[in-house]
Amino acid sequence: MNEKKSAVDLTDMAIGLVILGIVVTIGALVLTNLRDNRLTDLSTVATSNETLTTVTEKGEILSYKWVKSVDACINSTDAVKIASANYSTSISSVDGAAKVSFATGGTATFNNTNWGCNYTWYNTSSRPDYALASDAATGIAEYGNWFDIIVIVGIAGLVLALIFLAFGRDSGTGYSGGVGY
């Protein structure tokens, strides 16, 4: 019994893409965990009175990344300390950026004014072992951004290969150039 073999087998490519995706994902998780575990080993730096312009409910981002804590904020107009009930802070788990926002229901005199905030952040440039894991995790994350494009280009290449296979076959009925009566 003769088995009919398919023209193009895509199984190997599909398995390769799945394995590549799994390896990149595991690598990113390991590097991110390694980076985050080293974060609390870093030295901290205190920043005093960083000016945030017209703080509203939308919030303002502090200058330094990997913020440990926002300690206090003052109203720059009259140097009055702003009670913590008047603002909220959120720190990103991705890059450590901190956002200071005017709290809904806070004292209206502090809304849409300039603030000076004191905060503490981790000095990520002080340790090469942290920088290595952080840079590698950033690089793998950048590869993840290109992964969709790589898959699309691969699929386009397969479509072109199938078109060339379908239309590029020699039919054997052409003129051979000889005298054949």
Image (tube, rainbow, N blue to C red):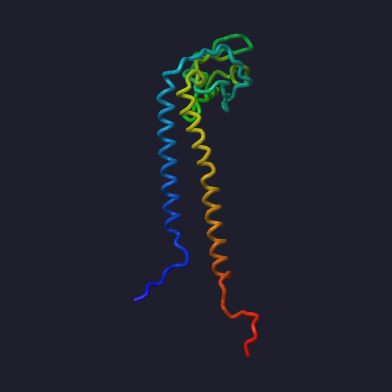
Q: Say whether residue 85 is visible.
A: no
Which quadrant of the structure image shows residue 53?
top right
In the rendered view, would you say 49 is above or below 59? above
Answer left or right for 175 relative to 86: right
Please tell me which residue is depicted at 47% across the width and 18% down the height of the picture. Answer: 69
Estimate the x, y position of residue 78 in percent, counting from the top left: 62, 9
Front residue of 87 and 1 = 1
In the rendered image, the quadrant that contains the N terminus is: bottom left
Which quadrant of the structure image shows residue 159?
bottom right
Estimate the x, y position of residue 42 in percent, counting from the top left: 45, 18
In the rendered view, would you say 116 is above or below 32? above
Which quadrant of the structure image shows residue 178?
bottom right
User: In the orientation shown, which residue stands out farthest toward the left?
Assistant: 1
Front residue of 105 and 73 = 73
Please tell me which residue is depicted at 51% across the width and 14% down the height of the picture. Answer: 45
Q: Say whether residue 34 is visible.
A: yes
In the rendered view, would you say 181 is above or below 10? below
Answer left or right for 132 relative to 79: left
Please tell me which residue is depicted at 51% across the width and 45% down the height of the picture. Answer: 147
Estimate the x, y position of residue 160 in percent, counting from the top left: 57, 61
